[in-house]
RNA sequence: GGGCAGUUAGCUCAGCUAGGGAGAGCAUCUCCCUUACAAGGAGGAGGUCGCAGGUUCAAUCCCUGCACUGCCCACCA
């Protein structure tokens, strides 16, 4: 097969995507003879199109899946998408808005229909993009969080929780987004630092001329104050506890209560308590049995509690109320004040805590269990530093508000018996996976379903087992075989939102963890370290990178920087360098292929020369490092290790050395060196296959003369037979000599086309045979015409000198040598050696060092010192020689 | 307020869970289109390893404190 001079990613990528899909390379069936290794994809939202975060997340998962597959596991990677609740509904609402419509114009049924239609049209976009990225997913198992299997699981889980008394409905203080018009859970609120004001307001004390000053950032909520709280230990206010104050603007009387939650150091140490609009105040109210007065409604408008402000927005009310307080002399002062304000994680609207009737899940018990499996190591975090935040979060959880007042999602499987007017009868509510035909209580057939849908994260939490049809058959064979999964790979931003909840649900319903490992990777940032966002305009489109540099280049670049738990900055240079690497692989392969033409090459490497043993040893070490790194998700280490081995050692040294044998007339010689080249090339390609699936499959096919994916081959294994420590040391001698000669050539501006003579004067006899045995390589690679090896050789006039450990090298450069340059070069080398010498002798003259440091270390220092001495002496001599 | 990361060459990062001569890629300089690769090769320059203490014969590496950056959590009225 012909190989082009430049690797053309476009040409091969599409072919392999089709091949893997058509041949079902990544489909998995139960095979009890093999261990399963499962990953369930973090389902991207159907709204999505592939961004760099997806590219990273899925590249990493694909690397793991391919690696495990090559290690012999029966791997399964389940694809799917998430319906994405609020986020997706918002997208479709925006589309409607362009047509000048709202969801209310359509009505619930038509709107939901529209949502489904939209999903049909665009929901698979991201899955197609994952195919292009090369992801080895089992496409026949593609799931959607609102498909039949998932819906059944959701209903089953809900009913189970309800029947056990873990789900309840009640009016509580919740986070409310006035734009999305729905409640949110605590973690769906993002807190951002904002500049605001702190208003000091005087509350007159009843039957007194005195007043109590409170400080607040939200004066508008004062209309709903039902107490003022002070710390019971606060001497300033001890006398006042139990007394009454008159609430300005309303003239309502409220009590002064004592509560430990109040911080004496903050503001005035007296807090206005608005239970209906602040979570702390709500708690205080519960402890002191305070009245709860709502002043803000679900639209974010003031209620009719105080007629004057009715219907005003929060902002308008604030301005008006501050004005009124000022006018009436209640406003003591205003300070600038920075504090964090909750915003909706989907639309950034300021969150209003309001009282609302919602469904809640009691999470206390399940959180304890979910924390325990992390503490005892059943679920491991990579990096482990995430374990603490994870358990800490679980240990301080409030009940989960699971109902949302949107239309897109799993509708809550609760039914009510209603009368002709649609009002609820006195019958019990019905929790059922199917809509009941009639009320089991009174037989009425007029049944309606609860209006709310479930938090999208409720169905996501069931994902690791709902994809295996847990809803229909809780103990099916596939679930038993593929669950628990091997690893969950994700960014840390959804650790609580999603990861923790999967663990809770898995333990609840399957009595087992959902995954053994949690691999938490960082966020891809732009070149200057900023988070990529549409508004900043710094988004790098992975699809653009794929078409410009190739998919393997994108994948390699991501892998190379994907250290667990750390954010990464990525730029064009990273992709460029990865593309160059792909090209390097391609050309090295091409070189080997060209030379193999017409020859039969052994499968096992024939290790004859020093360099053979050296390179196989290096290769073997690489296999060990790469395997170990991939096993603990150090994908970056794996990628860098292969890169370094392949480029620096295999290409720059071994292939260069092999050329000398390649051109030899001796066919057997050629076959021998090719056996090593081929063996290592194949092994390296295999190690790279998880990261760069396209180019490696292409090369694999070329070398094997048949099309069969490299992922079906075995990942290279560390081999005791390939350990050659001594040879590796000897090789270093050869490399040092070659480097010295090259250095002289370069510094003296000797053209690479010119062959020179070299004299190697042996200072250390034990090393002379190494040079002797490898003279041809040194000559070939350093472009030496005649190499003379000897003892006590005298340096010729007009020759340059280099000193290697155990050798002197003279290079006659008749007419070429520049005396000043040579002097400068030698002086520089002397200087470096002097530095080293000083460091060594300083240590050795330190008696503590000599007596207390390990003998090995002291000896090493001594050797270094004497080596430096010899070299310096030789160089000095040569300086005099030059004159 | 609490916690977690990070701070090493101009840039992006290794090295720090073996404490003992500072590494890579990109960029830069010199030479070279040497038939695998100019998306390449050879050679070079470039760093008081954030600051201050401590432990040690020896600290980029271990400990403490501080500074800056980023992130997470919190009942920041």
Image (cartoon, coloured by chain):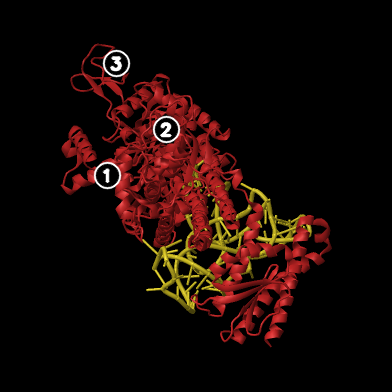
Q: Is residue A372 left or right of residue A709?
A: right
The local secondary structure at tag 3 comes to loop
Q: Are marks 1 and 3 on the same chain?
A: yes
Residue A105 image position (x, y, % from top left): 16, 39
Residue of label 3: A427
Number of the front mark, 1 or 2: 1
The residue wearing badge 2 is A400
Figure chain in red: A
- Above or below A844: residue A463: above
List x then y, in percent, for residue A432. 31, 19
Could you tell whether A528 is left or right of A436 in the image? right
Residues marked 1 and 2 touching at CB (< 8 Å): no
User: Crowdedness of circle 2 by 10 Å Cα count: few (<14), some, many (20+)?
Assistant: some
For the C terminus of chain A, the image quarter is bottom right
Chain ID of residue with mark 3: A
SS class, disc 2: strand
Residue tagged by mark 1?
A: A125
Chain B rendered in what hue? yellow
Residue at x 60%, y 57% (from the top left corner): A610
Q: Could you classify mark 1 by the number of other residues whose Cα lies within 10 Å: few (under 14), some (14-19), or many (20 or more)? A: some
| Marks 2, 3: nearer the viewer | 2
Q: Quadrant of residue A28?
A: top left
Q: Are marks 2 and 3 on the same chain?
A: yes
Looking at the image, do the residues carrying marks 2 and 3 touch, with CB atoms under 8 Å apart?
no
Q: Nearer the viewer, residue A265 or A192?
A: A192
Q: Nearer the viewer, residue A743 or A304?
A: A743
Of the residues under marks 2 and 3, which one precedes in the sequence?
2
Q: Nearer the viewer, residue A25 or A245?
A: A25
Q: Position of residue A372 (x, y in %)?
A: 55, 31
Q: CA distance from mark 1 to mark 2?
A: 32 Å
């Amino acid at each position: 097969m012909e190989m082009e001079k430049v690797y053309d990613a476009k040409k091969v990528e599409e072919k392999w995507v089709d091949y893997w899909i058509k041949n079902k390379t990544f489909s998995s069936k139960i095979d009890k003879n093999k261990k399963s290794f499962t990953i369930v994809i973090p389902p991207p939202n159907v709204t999505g199109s592939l961004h760099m975060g997806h590219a990273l997340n899925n590249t990493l998962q694909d690397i793991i899946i391919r690696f495990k597959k090559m290690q012999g596991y029966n791997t399964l990677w389940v694809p799917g998408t998430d319906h994405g609740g609020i986020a997706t509904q918002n997208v479709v609402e925006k589309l409607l808005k362009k047509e000048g419509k709202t969801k209310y114009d359509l009505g619930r049924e038509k709107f939901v229909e529209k949502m489904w239609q939209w999903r049909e049209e665009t929901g698979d976009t991201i899955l197609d993009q994952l195919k292009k990225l090369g992801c080895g997913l089992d496409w026949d198992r593609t799931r959607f969080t609102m498909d039949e299997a998932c819906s059944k699981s959701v209903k089953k889980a809900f009913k189970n929780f309800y029947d056990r008394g873990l789900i309840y409905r009640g009016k509580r203080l919740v986070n409310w987004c006035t734009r999305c018009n729905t409640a949110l859970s605590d973690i769906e609120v993002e807190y951002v630092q904002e500049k605001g004001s702190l208003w000091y307001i005087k509350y007159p004390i009843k039957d007194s001329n005195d007043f109590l000053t409170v400080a607040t950032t939200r004066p508008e909520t004062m209309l709903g104050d039902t107490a003022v709280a002070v710390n019971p230990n606060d001497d300033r206010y001890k006398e006042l506890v139990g007394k009454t104050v008159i609430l300005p603007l309303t003239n309502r009387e409220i009590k002064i209560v004592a509560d430990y939650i109040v911080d004496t150091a903050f503001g005035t140490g007296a807090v206005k308590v608005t239970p209906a609009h602040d979570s702390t105040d709500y708690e205080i109210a519960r402890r002191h049995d305070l009245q709860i007065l709502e002043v803000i409604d679900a639209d974010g408008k003031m209620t009719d509690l105080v007629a004057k402000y009715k219907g005003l927005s929060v902002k308008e009310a604030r301005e008006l109320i501050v004005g009124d307080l000022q006018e009436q002399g209640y406003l003591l002062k205003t300070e600038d004040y920075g504090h964090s304000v909750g915003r909706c994680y989907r639309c950034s609207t300021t969150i209003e805590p309001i009282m609302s009737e919602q469904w809640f899940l009691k999470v206390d018990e399940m959180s304890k269990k979910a924390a325990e499996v992390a503490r005892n190591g059943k679920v491991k975090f990579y990096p482990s530093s995430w374990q603490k935040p994870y358990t800490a979060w679980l240990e301080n959880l409030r009940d989960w508000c699971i109902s949302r007042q949107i239309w897109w999602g799993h509708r809550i499987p609760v039914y009510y018996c209603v009368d002709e007017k649609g009002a609820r009868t006195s019958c019990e509510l019905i929790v059922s996976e199917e809509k009941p035909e009639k009320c089991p209580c009174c037989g009425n057939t007029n049944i309606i379903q609860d209006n709310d849908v479930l938090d999208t994260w409720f169905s996501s939490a069931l994902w690791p087992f709902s994809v295996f049809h847990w809803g229909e058959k809780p103990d099916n064979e596939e679930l038993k075989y593929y669950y628990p999964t091997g690893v969950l790979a994700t960014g840390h931003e959804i650790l609580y939102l999603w990861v923790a909840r999967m663990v809770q649900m898995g333990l609840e319903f399957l009595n087992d963890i959902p995954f053994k490992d949690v691999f938490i990777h960082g966020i891809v940032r732009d070149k200057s370290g900023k988070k990529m966002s549409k508004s900043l305009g710094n988004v790098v489109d992975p699809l653009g990178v794929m078409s410009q540099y190739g998919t393997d280049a994108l994948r390699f670049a991501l892998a190379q920087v994907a250290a667990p738990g750390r954010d990464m900055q990525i730029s064009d240079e990273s992709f460029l360098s990865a593309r160059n690497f792909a090209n390097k692989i391609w050309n090295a392969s091409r070189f080997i292929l060209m030379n193999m033409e017409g020859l039969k090459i052994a499968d096992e490497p024939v290790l004859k020369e020093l360099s053979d043993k050296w390179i196989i040893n290096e290769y073997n070490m690489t296999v060990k490092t790469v395997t170990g790194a991939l096993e603990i998700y150090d994908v970056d280490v794996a990628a860098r290790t292969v890169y370094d081995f392949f480029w620096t050692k295999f290409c720059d040294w071994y292939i260069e050395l092999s050329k000398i044998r390649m051109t030899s007339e001796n066919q057997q010689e050629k076959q021998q060196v090719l056996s090593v080249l081929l063996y290592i090339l194949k092994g390296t390609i295999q190690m790279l296959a998880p990261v760069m699936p396209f180019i490696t499959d292409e090369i694999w096919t070329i070398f094997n003369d048949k099309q069969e994916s490299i992922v079906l081959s075995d990942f290279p294994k560390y081999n005791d037979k390939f350990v050659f420590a001594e040879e590796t040391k000897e090789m270093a001698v050869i490399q040092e000599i070659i480097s010295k000669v090259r250095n002289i050539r370069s510094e003296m501006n000797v053209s690479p086309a010119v062959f020179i003579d070299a004299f190697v004067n042996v200072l250390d006899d034990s090393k002379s045979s190494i040079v002797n045995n490898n003279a041809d390589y040194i000559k070939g690679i350093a472009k030496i015409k005649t190499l003379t090896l000897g003892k006590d050789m005298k340096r010729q006039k007009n020759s340059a000198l280099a000193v290697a450990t155990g050798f002197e090298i003279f290079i006659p450069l008749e007419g070429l040598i520049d005396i000043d340059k040579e002097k400068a070069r030698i002086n520089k080398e002397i200087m470096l050696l002097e530095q080293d010498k000083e460091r060594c002798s300083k240590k050795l003259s330190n008696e503590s060092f000599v007596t207390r440091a390990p003998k090995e270390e002291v000896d090493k220092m001594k050797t270094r010192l004497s080596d430096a001495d010899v070299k310096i002496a030789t160089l000095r001599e040569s300086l005099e020689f030059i004159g």
